[in-house]
Amino acid sequence: MPTYVEIMAQIEALQKQAEEMRRAEIADVIAEIRQKIRDYDLTAADLGFGAPAAPAAKPSAGKRASVKPKYRDPASGATWSGRGVMPKWLKAQIEAGRAKEDFLIADEAAGAH
C-alpha cells in the first residue's frame, strides 16, 4: 500500500502531465474552432462575445432631468421646485403669515389662472 507522501507525489506528477497534455492540445482545438468559424461564417456576436444589445432607454434614478423651479425668494433669488423638503426661506415666510403662492414664479402664476 502506497504512503500518503507517495500518493501526493503521484498526484503532483499527474497534474504536471495533465497540464502538458492540455497545452499540447490547445493549438489543435484553436485551429479547429477557427476552421468552424470560417466554415459557418460566424461572428463574435453569434458566439455570444459581441456587445450585448442596448437595453430599452430607461432613466436611472441618478440621472433624472432637473425640474423647473416653481417658487422664488425675491430677496435672495433662491428657488424651489415644489418637490422635496420645503426650503427654510419659504418655511420662514409662511410662518410669518405669507402664502406659498406669493412666491410662485411669474409663468407658473399665469398658468395657474
Image (cartoon, helix red, strand yellow):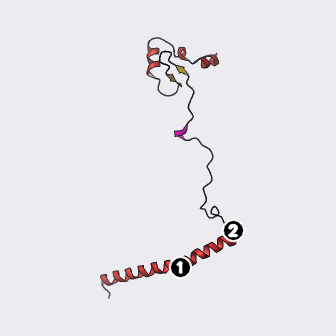
Please provide percent x and percent y for residue 111. 64, 19
Q: Which residue is mark 1?
A: 25
Q: Is residue 53 above or below residue 6?
A: above
Mark linked to residue 41: 2
Q: Quadrant of the C terminus?
A: top right
Helix, strand or loop at label 2? It is loop
Please provide percent x and percent y for residue 13. 39, 82
Q: Determine the residue positioned at 57% across, 18% down.
A: 105
Mark linked to residue 15: none
Q: Is residue 62 magenta?
A: yes
Q: Is residue 41 above or below residue 11?
A: above
Q: Determine the residue positioned at 32% across, 87% down.
A: 2
Q: Determine the residue positioned at 69% across, 70% down.
A: 40
Q: Determine the residue positioned at 63% across, 16% down.
A: 110
Task: Answer with the quarter of the image where residue 38 lies.
Answer: bottom right
Q: CA distance from mark 1 to mark 2?
A: 24 Å
Nearer to me, 59 or 76: 76
Identity, as a three-letter code, of the amino acid under mark 2: Asp
Q: Is residue 105 left or right of residue 12?
A: right
Q: Is residue 89 magenta?
A: no
Please provide percent x and percent y for residue 90. 47, 18
Nearer to me, 63 or 76: 76
| Tag 1 and tag 2, C-beta contact below 8 Å | no
Please provide percent x and percent y for residue 99. 51, 13
Q: Residues within 10 Å of mark 1 (few under 14, many from 20)?
A: few
Q: Is residue 64 left or right of residue 45?
A: left
Q: Is residue 47 above or below residue 81?
A: below
Task: Answer with the quarter of the image where residue 43 lies.
Answer: bottom right
The magenta segment: 51-64
Q: Residues within 10 Å of mark 2 (few under 14, many from 20)?
A: few
Q: Quadrant of the N terminus?
A: bottom left
